[in-house]
Image (cartoon, helix red, strand yellow):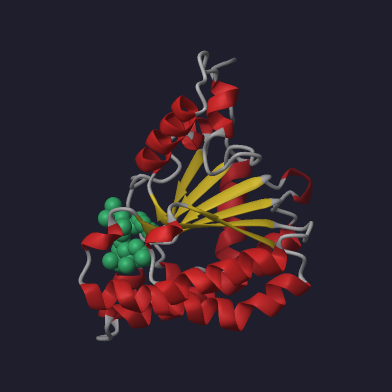
């Protein structure tokens, strides 16, 4: 049974398996991304219901540019569609949208949608919803180093370093869920995941439901987090 008193504060999700979901059905990969967007809608809503305070989702990695141009274009078109269809609801639910990653490199119309989503929800006080777009953990670390050098910092501490990351002001993820069955992080939250609990499920992302989400949190609740202690 899910313990409502011990809901992880920050859940991060590697939304993987869209392509395989589509392939299994003889459909093009972008169809899988489209269905994945619907799954995301439900998971955001359910995060709020459960009392998760921070939700971070991996939407596009710094390595995903290696994919065929039609797929990359399709993914960013879906981002525009997602914002158009979901922004009102997100805003009504008091969700704050943040983007982690270098979104200055994404197509112009997607940048416009991102700006709109950030600005519309900037004063909201509910769920912090971080969408990782053109995000890579290594790129994030190098960017933080360069920013700190540019500021002329002389003594770097873990705290100051964490504040130079995209996730400044967010606690580290308690739980990282990966759908699609692969046991790897694929450059996601490299610094922040040091003590995260990992739960991998075989379900492809478009099939991931709130019930499965609760099951993953139950697994998390059964773990003994020691942080190096006893
Ligand atoms: C994850 O699904 C979404 C993105 C990387 C944008 P994939 O597209 O990686 O799906 P699979 O892993 O090929 O099934
Ligand atoms: C990770 O999935 C990135 C996202 C879910 C956005 P990938 O499908 O890109 O990861 P690999 O290639 O299997 O490691
Ligand atoms: Mg994949």
Q: In this image, 8 relative to 83: left or right?
A: right
Q: In this image, 148 relative to 122: left or right?
A: left
Find residue 66 and report its horizontal and vertical position in percent.
21, 61
Number of numbered discs overlaid on the protein picture = 0
Observer able to see residue 167: yes
Asked if residue 121 is positioned above or below residue 36 in the image, the reply reads above
Q: In this image, 208 relative to 18: left or right?
A: right
Find residue 197 and report its horizontal and vertical position in percent.
52, 39
Assign ligand 3 to one image quadrant: bottom left
Along the line of sight, which residue is nearer the eye, 147 or 160?
A: 147
Along the line of sight, which residue is nearer the eye, 225 or 72?
A: 72
Find residue 99 and report its horizontal and vertical position in percent.
54, 57
Q: In this image, 74 relative to 57: left or right?
A: left
- Residue at 58 percent across and 37 percent down: it is 172
Residue most toward the bottom? 26
Observer able to see residue 59: no
- Residue at 48 percent across and 36 percent down: it is 193
Along the line of sight, which residue is nearer the eye, 83 or 24?
A: 83
Question: Which quadrant of the view contains residue 89?
Answer: bottom right
- Residue at 28 percent across and 75 percent down: it is 71
- Residue at 51 percent across and 36 percent down: it is 192
Question: Which quadrant of the view contains residue 230?
Answer: top right
Find residue 188 and report its horizontal and vertical position in percent.
41, 46
Along the line of sight, which residue is nearer the eye, 190 or 3?
A: 190
């Amino acid at each position: 049974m899910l313990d409502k008193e011990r809901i992880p504060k920050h859940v991060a999700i590697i939304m993987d398996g869209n392509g395989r979901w589509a392939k299994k059905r003889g459909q093009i990969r972008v169809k899988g991304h489209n269905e994945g967007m619907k799954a995301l809608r439900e998971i955001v809503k359910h995060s709020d219901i459960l009392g998760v305070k921070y939700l971070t989702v991996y939407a596009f990695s710094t390595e995903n540019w290696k994919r065929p141009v039609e797929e990359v274009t399709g993914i960013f078109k879906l981002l525009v569609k997602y914002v158009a269809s979901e922004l009102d609801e997100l805003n009504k639910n008091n969700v704050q949208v943040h983007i982690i990653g270098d979104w200055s490199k994404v197509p112009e119309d997607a940048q416009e949608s991102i700006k709109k989503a950030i600005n519309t929800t900037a004063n909201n006080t509910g769920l912090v919803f971080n969408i990782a777009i053109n995000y890579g953990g290594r790129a994030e670390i190098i960017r933080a180093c360069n920013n700190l050098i540019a500021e002329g910092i002389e003594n770097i501490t873990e705290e100051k370093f964490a504040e130079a990351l995209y996730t400044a002001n967010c606690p580290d993820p308690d739980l990282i869920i990966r759908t699609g069955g692969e046991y790897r992080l694929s450059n996601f939250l490299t610094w922040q995941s040091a003590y995260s609990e990992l739960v991998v499920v075989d379900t492809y992302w478009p099939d991931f439901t709130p019930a499965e989400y609760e099951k993953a949190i139950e697994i998390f609740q059964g773990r003994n987090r020691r942080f190096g202690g006893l």
